[in-house]
Amino acid sequence: MYIKNQDLKILKQISKESGIDKFWLGGSIPYYRTAKKLGKNFNYSDYDLAIKGGKKEYISIKNKLKKNNFEIIQSRPYFLKFKKIFQIVAKKKAIILDIAIVKKLSYLGHFNWERIFWSFPSGKIYDPYHSLKAIEMGKLRLTITPKRENPLILISRFTKICARFDINFVQNKKLFRMAKRLARLVKKWKTKDSFHGKYAKEHAYFGILQAISRSKNKKKFLSMLQKSNILDALFPEINQKLIGIDVLNINFKKIKNEKDVANLFRDILKINKKQRKLLDRKLEIISGRLDKK
């Protein structure tokens, strides 16, 4: 199966601007139209590219981007499914590229809806898990066992997908079981490794705030995070406090972004200084991301 000519133009433009002549495009763009048909409209701000290779290709791509007037925002080793890869985030005017240099394409994506890619220059669609059909049917599932990835990364990805597609993961028995399992794994997770510890926590904390801010019904979504124990796994101080207050009295209408959710959490704990300190430590970890809002 091949992509439409109008989609191929997107890939050609990316190649022309970056100088990269062979890559895969992943992220939300390959399923954007399918989601739109279902009434799920969202914006995408960058292009997620995958390039097969290792350190040699990483250095080569970085130099090529610089040569083509891209600003390198971030370049570093990264981990997906406990496998080392390389990430480059680069910007040129309105174009933002988030590039993963991987040995295998299977390193990318944790859920079936994420495992679809467009190939350049061939224009072929790589969709081994029939992602588009699964999205249309509303069937979301993990394509790996939870133990093959850091649970903090998994729980962040899961909640953001559910928020984007307005999935009731409490009503869906399989997803509810999975959500509770991920919450248990997060509670047990311990490591001294910087990436799988501090960075993964940052990813998860911010991911939850992002999911809440993007959810269609924020009160309902927060309730699902409580019932699945996800909120307790990441923000137990908030979960404990919410048990004793009427969620209906919370003004969710003023929440427009992640920073608003963070401020809401602060307000919830404004009287309890001890619990507020615990929250503030977590928000400090993601302060760099919140400051961009």
Image (tube, rainbow, N blue to C red):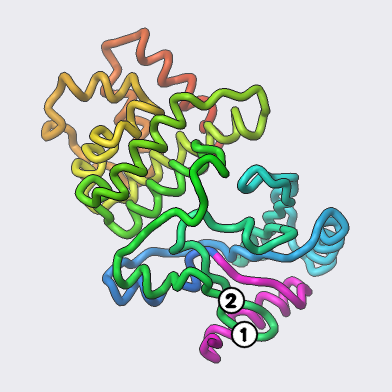
Amino acid at dot 2: Trp
4 part of magenta stretch: yes
166 sits left or right of 42 in the view? left
Q: Residue at x 33, y 19 (%)?
A: 237
Q: Which is more toward the observer, 127 or 199?
A: 127
Q: Residue at x 30, y 65 (%)?
A: 138
When the figure is inspected, residue 222 is found, relative to residue 34, above or below; the finding is above
- In the image, which disc is placed on residue 118? 2
- In the image, which disc is placed on residue 186? none
Task: Locate residue 105, reporting x and y percent.
Answer: 65, 63
Extreme residue in the bottom direction: 5
Extent of the magenta region: 1-26
Where disc 1 sits, the SS reads loop
Task: Locate residue 131, reporting x and y percent.
Answer: 44, 70
18 part of magenta stretch: yes
84 sits left or right of 59 in the view? left
Q: Residue at x 19, y 22 (%)?
A: 243
Q: Residue at x 31, y 66 (%)?
A: 40
Kindly identify which residue carries mark 1: 123
